[in-house]
Image (spheres, grey):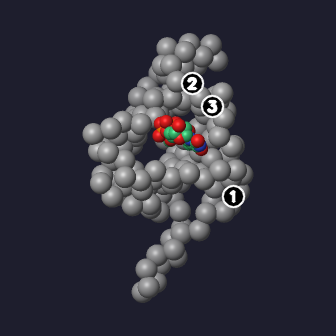
């Protein structure tokens, strides 16, 4: 499976670092929604779904967490621990998130507004859908 991690240019100087996110420049889609997660319990797992169409970019602004990405053929684990990198979450990829550090802050940029109908929350339904592609 192709794991797409986008390096984000850091404008660093002796004051610290600054990263800019610009649609169609370093973000490969038009940004319609931004959400973030923090104070996630480290004994919890999130996700357990795929999206029919939604594309997203996720950045660990602080701390670390692990993603499992699954395209129906292969499962790959990715550690997110760098605020200068974004993990592209394409459509039709099952995702699970776990091992959140206490200080973990994840920000997600999305190419569509929130739509519960875009979620595939049943793993067998997901496998069936990707096997029919
Ligand atoms: C994804 C992973 C990486 C909203 O009302 N608006 C929103 O934009 C979002 C994202 C969520 N919600 C509500 C829906 C639920 O009642 O917030 C609650 C928690 O959402 P959910 O259980 O879907 O959270 P995760 O962490 O399992 O998944 C989220 C995104 O939903 C999903 O698109 O790819 O993060």
Mark 1 touches mark 2? (CB < 8 Å): no
Crowding at mark 3 (Cα within 10 Å: few <14, some 14-19, many 20+): few
Q: Position of residue 113 (x, y in %)?
A: 69, 43
Q: Tell which tag, 1 or 2, sits nearer the viewer.
A: 2
First reached walking from the N terminus: tag 3 or tag 1: 1
Image x and y of residue 82, in percent: 40, 59
- Residue pictured at 33% horizontal, 58% vertical: 103
Q: Is residue 55 positioned above or below 75 on the image?
A: below
Query: For the point 59% across and 28% down, which residue is it?
Result: 119
Query: For the residues marked 3 and 1, what is the alpha-carbon distance in whole angstroms?
Result: 24 Å
Q: Is residue 8 left or right of residue 30?
A: left
Q: Which residue is mark 1?
A: 23
Answer left or right for 42 relative to 74.
left
Q: In this rendering, is residue 28 above or below 45?
A: below
Residue 131 in percent (x, y) is at 57, 14
Q: Which residue is mark 3?
A: 116
Question: Closer to the observer: label 2 or label 3?
Answer: 3
Whether 84 is drawn above or below 56: the answer is below
Q: CA distance from mark 2 to mark 3?
A: 9 Å
Q: Which quarter of the figure is the C terminus placed in?
A: top right
Disc 2 crowd rating (10 Å Cα; few below 14, some 14-19, many 20+) is: some
The CB of the residue at mark 2 lies under 8 Å from ligand 1: no
Q: At x 63% / y 47%, what residue is drawn? A: 110
Determine the CA span between mark 1 and mark 2. Answer: 26 Å
Q: Is mark 3 within 8 Å of ligand 1?
A: yes
**Residue 51 percent across, percent down from the top left:** 59, 31
In depth, the one of 100 and 81 nearer the eye is 100
Depth check: give the residue in front, 122 or 22. Answer: 122
Q: Is residue 69 visible?
A: no
């Amino acid at each position: 499976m192709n794991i797409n991690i986008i390096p984000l240019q850091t404008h660093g100087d002796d004051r610290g670092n600054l990263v800019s996110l610009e649609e169609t420049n370093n973000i490969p889609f038009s940004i319609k929604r931004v959400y973030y997660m923090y104070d996630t319990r480290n004994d919890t797992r999130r996700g357990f779904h795929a999206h029919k169409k939604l594309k997203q970019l996720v950045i660990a602004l602080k701390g670390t967490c692990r993603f499992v990405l699954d395209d129906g053929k292969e499962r790959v684990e990715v550690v997110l621990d760098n605020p200068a990198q974004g993990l592209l979450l394409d459509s039709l990829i099952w995702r699970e998130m776990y091992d959140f550090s206490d200080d973990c802050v994840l920000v997600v940029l999305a190419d569509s507004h929130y739509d519960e109908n875009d979620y595939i929350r049943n793993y067998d339904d997901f496998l069936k859908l990707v096997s029919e592609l």
